Structure formats: structure tokens, C-alpha cells
Amino acid sequence: MKVKICGITNLEDAYIAIDAGADALGFVFYPESPRYITPQDARSIIKMLPPFVEKVALFVNETPEVIRETCLLSGCTLAQIHFDVEDDFFTQVDFPSLRVVRAKKREDILTHTDEYRLIDAYCESFGGSGKRLNIEWFEGIDCSKIILAGGLDPDNVASLKSYGFYGVDVSSGVEASYGKKNPQRVKAFIQKAKE
């Protein structure tokens, strides 16, 4: 499974994640999040990172223009659209993007099955809540284009292996405090996801 460590706010945590084998890092450009980072601060981290690591910009309720400009300014390589949009929104963004499905019921995870998408538990606060989806929803479906988020941690990530998810995304499950990662939890999470 691919692993994304989200809510990166400092260079130390970025390197801890990369050294442990993370495939992607997430930067939250949503001012109401306790993990918010400015595009300028993200850029100062990203320019120090090695190649071949995806840098994902998370957005909530932004315009296509702001999303594209922020990605270009920060140096991010993928935009994660963490709110409900129509298909033409992605065309307007004109930048590599990932749709987020905030699932309230099993039927929600069966949408957009032709594309890679991140599926998270629905909550009012938009991510990083630690709220977990009902994993039984994924039984018997093709999960090869799904990145699972919501309530994941080093203790439960290994149990997802049999579902065949493309990847997993974690933030609060590997934190010491908001915006600060726990190195041991980051390493354990990535090791268990990939072993």
C-alpha cells in the first residue's frame, strides 16, 4: 500500500516520514485546520525535500484559481479536493487533482469508481478528526483505486491488507499534538502498512 502522511507543518516531520518510507506528504491549506500551513511555509519545506515524493495540497472550499495558484506557489504536485464539486471543477483547476469522497453511507464509496479517489469518513470539520469508516462497507468491492483515510493508526492499519486498497492516508493517528508528528508512530504506521 502507498502511504501518505498528512498535516505536515515542519521539515523535521517531513524527513521523519520520508525516511520511514512515506510515498506522499500532505500540506493543509485550510485556515480553520489546526494543521494549517501557509503556501510560503510549505514551499520552504518542499524545496528541501528529495525527488520522487508526492507533495499533496489539501483544500476546502476554494476556487479553482486559488487551488492552482497555491499549488504552483508552494511546489505541491497534487491537489486534494476535500469538498464536494462537480466534474468540470477539476478541468477548471487544470492541475493534477485527487477527489475526496466524504462517505456517510456505503453507497457513497461506490461513486466515481473509474478514478483514483480518497475516501474519508464524513465529519463537519473536514479531516483529521480520527473518525473511522465502517470497514465492512469495502468487503467485496474493488478497492484498487481507493486511498482510505479516517481513524487509521499503527494499531489498525495492518488489518486493511486483505482489501487491496491503493493507499492509506493518516494524520491524527500518528501525531504527538496538532501539527506535530510522533516519530515512533509514523515509523510504525508505515512499516505495518507496507510489510
Image (cartoon, grey):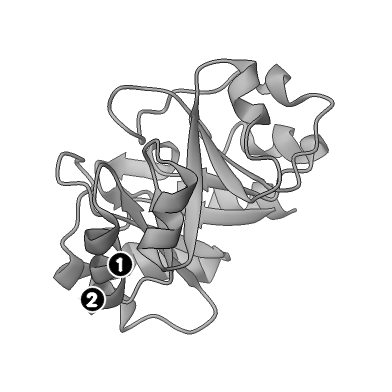
Q: Residue at x 35, y 43 (%)?
A: 175
Q: Position of residue 23 (x, y in %)?
A: 56, 65
Q: Residue at x 19, y 57 (%)?
A: 37
Question: Please, what is the three-letter code of the amino acid marked with disc 2?
Answer: Leu
Q: Is residue 171 left or right of residue 31?
A: right
Q: Residue at x 45, y 83 (%)?
A: 50
* Residue 180 visible in the snapshot: yes
Q: Residues within 10 Å of mark 2 (few under 14, many from 20)?
A: few
Q: Position of residue 154 (x, y in %)?
A: 56, 39
Q: Is residue 83 left or right of residue 146?
A: left
Question: Please, what is the three-letter code of the amino acid marked with disc 1?
Answer: Arg
- Spatial CA distance of label 1 from label 2 is 9 Å
Q: Position of residue 142 (x, y in %)?
A: 80, 38
Label 2: element kind:
helix
Q: Position of residue 82 (x, y in %)?
A: 38, 42
Residue 50 vertical position relative to residue 68 in the rendered view, above or below: below
Residue 73, which numbered label? 2
Residue 68, which numbered label? 1
Q: Nearer the viewer, residue 145 or 50?
A: 145
* Residue 186 visible in the snapshot: no
Residue 76, which numbered label? none
